[in-house]
Amino acid sequence: DGMANYARYQDALGWKGISVVAPSINVTTVYANGTKQSMSGTSAASPLVAGVAALIRAKYPSLSNEQVRRAIERSAQKIGPTSSYQTM
């Protein structure tokens, strides 16, 4: 477990609002036709976080966006200090 090198450019782009990241290296995905493929990058990571948000909202439909975000942040596993982000 760890953060991909290409994910370490948060501060360089001024993205101070990023509080949760998801696995993005060799994530197994399944396409609509049933084909499985391993992929990496934000195209693999973003749907994981969006899916968690959707599951929380389905279980607790009265939660606000902010409450869903806080629930995700509180339950996330910290993999390193934010100071470990480096520019590319």
Image (tube, helix red, strand yellow):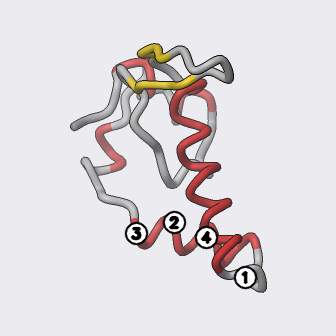
Number of marks: 4
Which circle's residue, 1 or 3, is located before the other in the chain? 1
Displayed quadrant of residue 83: top left
Per the rendering, the mark at residue 28 is: none
Disc 1 marks which residue?
63
Q: CA distance from mark 3 to mark 2?
A: 5 Å
Which circle's residue, 1 or 4, is located before the other in the chain? 4
Instruction: Give the residue type at disc 3.
Output: Ser
Per the rendering, the mark at residue 56 is: 4
Disc 3 marks which residue?
75
Q: CA distance from mark 1 to mark 3?
A: 16 Å
Do the residues bearing badges 1 and 4 touch, measured as CB atoms within 8 Å?
Answer: yes
Disc 2 marks which residue?
72
Decide: is 22 above or below 88: below
Q: CA distance from mark 1 to mark 2?
A: 12 Å
- Residue beneath the point at 51% across and 65% down: 72
Do the residues bearing badges 2 and 4 touch, measured as CB atoms within 8 Å?
Answer: yes
